[in-house]
Image (cartoon, rainbow, N blue to C red):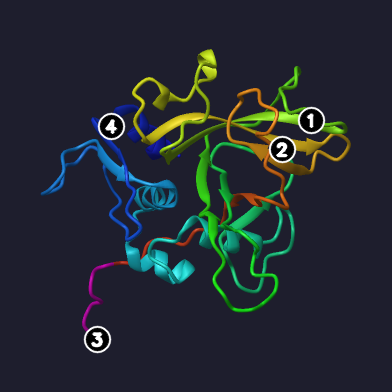
Amino acid sequence: MDYALEIAENAVVNEWSSSTEGGCYINWEEPSETHPAWSASTKAACFFTLSLRKAMGYSPADLYNMWDSTSPTSDYYFQLISMSPALGAPTPWVETHFRRVTKAVDIQKGDVLVVGLVRENGDEDGDGIRDEVLYSGHTVMITGPAVELTRQIMPRYSGTKQYMVPIVDSTNSPHGCDLGEYSDSRCATGEGGIGVGYMRVYTDSSTDILLGYTWSLTSSLKSYESPSKQPYRIARLVKLPPPESTEPPPPPP
């Protein structure tokens, strides 16, 4: 999280990558042969992945050993988290390195919010035909605890509470402008890429269990994304292994 916020604050080159074939990179304080220091070209899931690699010293091989992918998509992360136990549940047979956060009061800095892929019909008829992708998913990192809104914002629903959640992500769609101190940092430039903003989650008022979400704190009649139409998960990284050594082993005695 600290590395994600650091590049968000200091990036001198900050581009949103529209490539579907990778193309993501981040240089923090050290330049590469092709890009200067404090430069980035990212999209949602790879921004999270590259920040994790930076923090843990992971190589692509380390990621593959953990998750069978060197650069998971948002939907891939969504599926991993969906298979993961909730906080406090017994350790699974196969470690996913995620624990699901199911209540807003448990959200904390470093958690990740992932929206899954949405298809037009979900292929519920089982005809094997690839349905149209309406939304390819999204990944954001949460930068602090959720704060309950004492004055709820439209859309309002009976029996629910609303929480604002501070986030950092890479997107081409800012998380709300003209909101004063709660405006997305990308509103000032009008450019996509890495930035900070706020999302909103809804919970059951009696159990605090997470329900749907909105992209921003903007008041709107139709901004609510229900779990059945656009499912999401919030999770915490756990039991992360150390990076594997890249040094060859010593010779046998």
Q: CA distance from mark 4 to mark 1?
A: 36 Å
Mark 1 vs mark 2: in front: 1
Q: Are marks 3 and 4 in contact (CB under 8 Å)?
A: no
Q: Are marks 1 and 2 in contact (CB under 8 Å)?
A: yes
Magenta span contains residue 218: no
Relative to 205, is 149 above or below?
above
Determine whether label 4 and label 1 are within 8 Å by CB.
Answer: no
Q: Quick one: label 2 or label 3, which is nearer the N terminus?
A: 2
Residue for badge 2: 104
User: Marks 1 and 3: which is nearer the front?
Assistant: 1
Q: Which residue is mark 3?
A: 252
Label 3, label 4: how far apart the Cα atoms are: 47 Å
Q: Residue furthest bottom?
A: 253
Percent across and percent down for residue 40 are 28, 41
Which region is colored magenta?
246-253
Residue 161: image tag: 1
Residue flagged by tag 3: what amino acid is it?
A: Pro
Q: Is residue 23 left or right of residue 222?
A: left
Q: Amino acid at mark 2?
A: Ala
- Indicate whether 115 appears above or below 222: below
Looking at the image, tell me whether mark 4 or mark 1 is earlier in sequence order. 4
Residue 176 lies, in percent from the top left, at: 53, 26
Pick whichever of labels 4 and 2 is earlier in the sequence. Answer: 4
Pointer 4: what residue? 11
Mark before the other along the chain sequence, 1 or 3 = 1
Foreground label between 3 and 4: 4
Q: Is residue 145 above or below residue 91?
A: above
